[in-house]
Structure formats: C-alpha cells, structure tokens
Image (spheres, rainbow, N blue to C red):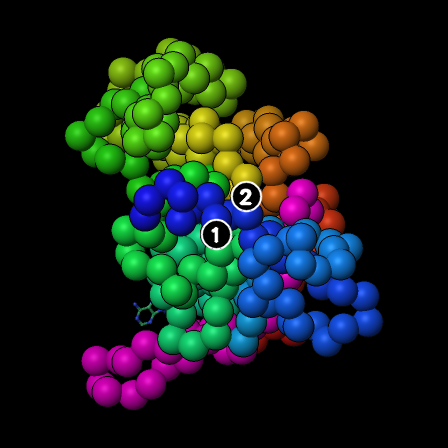
Amino acid sequence: MDELKLNNLADGCFSRESGMPEYRNLQTRNPQTSNRQTTFMLTTTHLTKTYKTAGGAQLTVLDDVSFDLAAGDSFAIVGPSGSGKTTLLGLCAGLDRASSGSVTLNGIRLDDLSEDERAEVRNRYVGFVFQNFQLIPTLTALENVMVPLELRGDANAEKIARGWLEKVGLGSRLDHYPAQLSGGEQQRVCIARAFANSPKILFADEPTGNLDADNAAGIVDLIFDLNRNAGTTLVLVTHDPELAKRTGRILRLKGGRAE
Ligand SMILES: Nc1ncnc2c1ncn2[C@@H]1O[C@H](COP(=O)(O)OP(=O)(O)OP(=O)(O)O)[C@@H](O)[C@H]1O
Ligand SMILES: [Mg+2]
C-alpha cells in the first residue's frame, strides 16, 4: 500500500457520538467530521468465522462477536480451550479474514484490504505474541527480533533488538536459534519481537503460558509498562484470572460467542 493511502486510512480513528446507536460511526474515516468523544483503536462488528470440516459440515468457531476498544485501553479475552480466543485475536490483528462481519483497527477497515496491505498495517501498528511463538527457525534470537524493525527500515534495528532481548532476560542467548532455546525462552523472544516494533496495539496470546512465576511477573510488568508509558492498547488472551483482572475489561467467550 502506498504511504499516502496508509496515512489517509490511519487518520481515520473513528468515534462514537454520545447517545447514538452503537456502531453509527463505523464508516467515519475523518475525525474532523464527527463530534468525537472516544477514539477507538479496535472495533469488531458481528464477527463470525466458519470452517468447512473434512466431512463437509459447516463449523462456526466464532459467532457474531462485536466490541470496541478505546485507544490506550487494556482488554482480556478469556474462555475455555477451543472457545475461539486465538481465532478472534488473529482476525482482530488482520492475520486471518472473517467469514462475515468486520474489523476496524486504528480507523482502518481490515476487510477492505488485500493480504499485502494487511501485512503493512500489521507491521506499522501491531505487535503480536503468538501462542505457538512462530519464530523463524533459521534465524537467531537477535535476528528474529530484528526482522520487523528491518522491514520498517529502522537504522537502529540491532541496538533496539538487543535492548529488548536484554529486558526479557535473554541477553546471553542472542545467538541461539529457536531450536536451541527452551519454550519459555522462545516465548520471551516472541515478546521482545512484538515490543521492539513500538506497536500501537499489542495482541498477546497466553503471553506467560510457558513461563515460571518470576519470569511471568516480569513479562506482565513489561506489558503493563508499555500500556502505561507508551499508551499501547492491550488485548490479552489468558487463562490466568489474576492477569485478566489487571486489564480494564474482560470478554468471555464460550463456544465462539461472547457471554
Ligand atoms: N483451520 C481450522 N479448521 C477447522 N477448525 C478450526 C480451524 N482452526 C481452529 N479451528 C477450531 O476452532 C475452535 C477455536 O479454536 P481457537 O484456537 O480459537 O481456540 P482457543 O480458545 O484459542 O483455545 P486454546 O485455549 O486451547 O488455545 C477450535 O475448536 C478449533 O478446533
Ligand atoms: Mg488459543
């Protein structure tokens, strides 16, 4: 996507006028045209994801989920295994496309965009901590964290990547390949990679799922520091009720539906 188009789209953090129906301003792209009260970083409307099973049946894994999240807010998505949490996170971050409904991130309607355009929006605004890490196996820890910075053309990619790896306690593992790292260490590389890009919104899928209590506490503090100090909007999937309680709002999913 060219720079101008992205900038124009990104200008459009939309708002809800008081007393108006819930999603009235969804299409509003220019903040000057509306009487703003809240700036939304993320909105989903009637988001649904279905898969066709091998047997040909239709399986609905996310069913009509709508919410909005103001810039700088923190939000937890909780629910039993298989309830659709990772699916919802992937749709919100533009990693996957919905079957119906829409996602608007930082004022940009993701469902209007091509695969490449969504990749560019992700690189510019989104940090994503994957449940299964998704590190590049042929790159070292340091190189993995440098990838998104280099994609952005950041001249200080190596320095920034080193700094974040040190913050997550991996200063002595910079040159290890993912296969040479423990599960918790891989998770921390994934977290460093997400933070290094200074995202406007951080999606983290069970970010402490593989960590011991001390490391988990350190990572949670880093996540909330990002929220407090850089205003990063947080969307956390967690099975940890204590972590969920630290966020401003909790969405409970059950069988793909918001409870
Ligand atoms: N590609 C796919 N094809 C068919 N079904 C899928 C596919 N991907 C996910 N599912 C199903 O969608 C449902 C929701 O999966 P999802 O990964 O979102 O769950 P989750 O809430 O993140 O669970 P967990 O807590 O175990 O990580 C699951 O029942 C899963 O089997
Ligand atoms: Mg999951």
Q: Residue at x 54, y 43 (%)?
A: 201
Residue visible at 44% across and 35% down in the picture: 194
User: Viewer-proximal residue, 41 or 246?
Assistant: 41
> Is residue 14 depicted above or below 152 in this figure?
below
> Which of the 4 image quadrants contains residue 153?
top left
* Image depth: mark 1 or mark 2 in front: 1
Residue found 74% across the figure and 56% down from its top? 36
Which secondary structure lies at badge 2? strand
Counting other residues with Cα less than 10 Å from the Cα at mark 2, is it few (<14), some (14-19), or many (20 or more)?
Answer: many
Q: Is residue 230 left or right of residue 35?
A: left
Asked whether residue 181 is in view, the answer is no
**Hey, what amino acid is under mark 2?**
Ile
157 up-or-down from 149: above or below = above
Above or below residue 31? Residue 204 is: above
> Looking at the image, which is closer to me, 74 or 135?
74
Give how far across and how far down residue 105 sits, in percent: 52, 54
Image marks 1 and 2: residues in contact by CB distance under 8 Å: no
The type of residue carrying mark 1 is Leu
Question: Going by the image, does 173 lie left or right of 206?
Answer: left
Which residue carries the number 1 mark? 9
Magenta stretch bounds: 47-76
Q: Main secondary structure of the magenta part?
A: strand
Q: Which residue is mark 2?
A: 201
Taking the image as shown, residue 140 lies to the left or right of residue 209, namely left
Earlier in the chain: of badge 1 and badge 2, it is: 1
List x then y, in percent, for residue 200.
55, 39
